[in-house]
């Protein structure tokens, strides 16, 4: 029986002085030819972002397929917005959400030359209003962990088969991952999404991540990107 596809959802990336905020992790993925989806916060990209991400955007696997997909992780990843100190895409109203969605989309196009197709909200917090926002943009076909599942829109898939590899934000742990994997391996048989925050990983946490990759590769899982996966339907 075929193993579930694996989508690595890596959050909170930016750039500074010709470097991404997660170079050691991205370099590891390049060396191992493992695909990953990288969530970029648009306002955290400085003017050197094009240089910082160039080698990763050009990186390919053994089949010549792109290793990385850049996905929309909000314009500023804020959670103090009116009316009640709300996150960007939950409880903030259509005009606000549309503005942040479009500003983030356009800034990534400007700095990285990339049209994104996947979205993941800051704090994984969305509402029904956001479903209208993403539903109106034909470029987007996937969303991670939507709080309110998109309905009435067959184009946008909600990727929510979550298997944790971090016991807390930024704390990647192989033993913890194994408990999660065993819990869900017979539940999620088509794909799983594993969220991580690589800008918070030191050498010890990167070693734990490598153990996870070793395990998944040994179990014959295929790593895929969300846009390509959403188009397989």
Image (cartoon, helix red, strand yellow):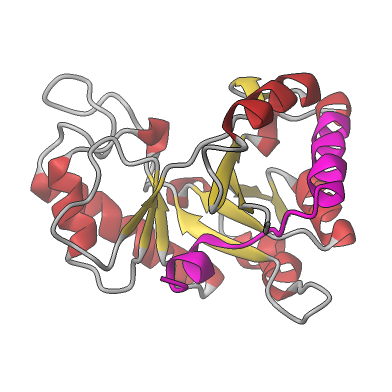
The reply to whether residue 209 is visible in this rendering is yes
Q: Name the outermost residue toward the front.
A: 1
Residue at point 67%, 59% (across, down)? 2
Q: Looking at the picture, does residue 215 appear above or below residue 26?
A: above
In the image: residue 96, left or right of residue 50: left
In the image: residue 102, left or right of residue 44: left
Q: Would you identify the image quadrant in which residue 168 lies?
A: top right
The reply to whether residue 12 is visible in this rendering is no
The quadrant of the rendering that contains the N terminus is bottom right
Residue 39, position as x, y percentages in the image: 53, 50
The residue lying toward the viewer, choosing from 141 and 97, is 141
Range drawn in magenta: 206-233
Q: Would you identify the image quadrant in which residue 173 lies?
A: top right
The quadrant of the rendering that contains the C terminus is bottom left
Q: Total marks drawn?
A: 0
Residue 17, position as x, y percentages in the image: 70, 51
Residue at point 54%, 54% (across, down)? 190
In the image: residue 227, left or right of residue 61: left
Residue 158 within the magenta-colored segment of the rendering: no
Q: Looking at the picture, does residue 182 appear above or below residue 89?
A: above
Q: Would you identify the image quadrant in which residue 147 lies?
A: top left
Residue at point 25%, 39% (across, down)? 89
Residue 224 within the magenta-colored segment of the rendering: yes
Residue 70, position as x, y percentages in the image: 54, 61
């Amino acid at each position: 029986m075929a193993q579930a596809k694996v989508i690595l959802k890596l959050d909170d990336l930016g750039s500074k002085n010709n470097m991404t905020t997660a170079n050691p992790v991205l370099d590891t993925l390049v060396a191992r030819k493992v695909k990953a989806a990288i969530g970029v916060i648009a306002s955290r990209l400085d003017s050197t972002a094009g240089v910082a991400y160039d080698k990763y955007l050009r990186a390919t696997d053994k089949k010549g397929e792109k290793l990385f997909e850049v996905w929309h992780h909000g314009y500023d990843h804020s959670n103090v917005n009116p009316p009640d100190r709300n996150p960007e895409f939950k409880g903030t109203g259509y005009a606000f959400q549309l503005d942040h969605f479009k500003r983030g989309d356009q800034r990534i196009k400007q700095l990285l030359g990339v049209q994104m197709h996947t979205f993941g909200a800051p704090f994984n917090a969305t509402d029904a209003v956001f479903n209208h926002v993403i539903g109106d943009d034909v470029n987007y076909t996937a969303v991670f962990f939507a709080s309110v599942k998109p309905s009435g829109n067959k184009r946008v898939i909600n990727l929510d088969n979550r298997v944790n590899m971090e016991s807390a934000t930024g704390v990647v742990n192989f033993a913890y991952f194994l408990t999660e994997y065993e819990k869900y391996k017979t539940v999620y048989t088509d794909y799983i999404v594993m969220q991580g925050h690589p800008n918070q990983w030191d050498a010890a946490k990167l070693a734990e991540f490598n153990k996870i990759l070793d395990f998944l590769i040994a179990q014959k899982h295929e790593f895929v990107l969300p846009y390509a996966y959403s188009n397989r339907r």
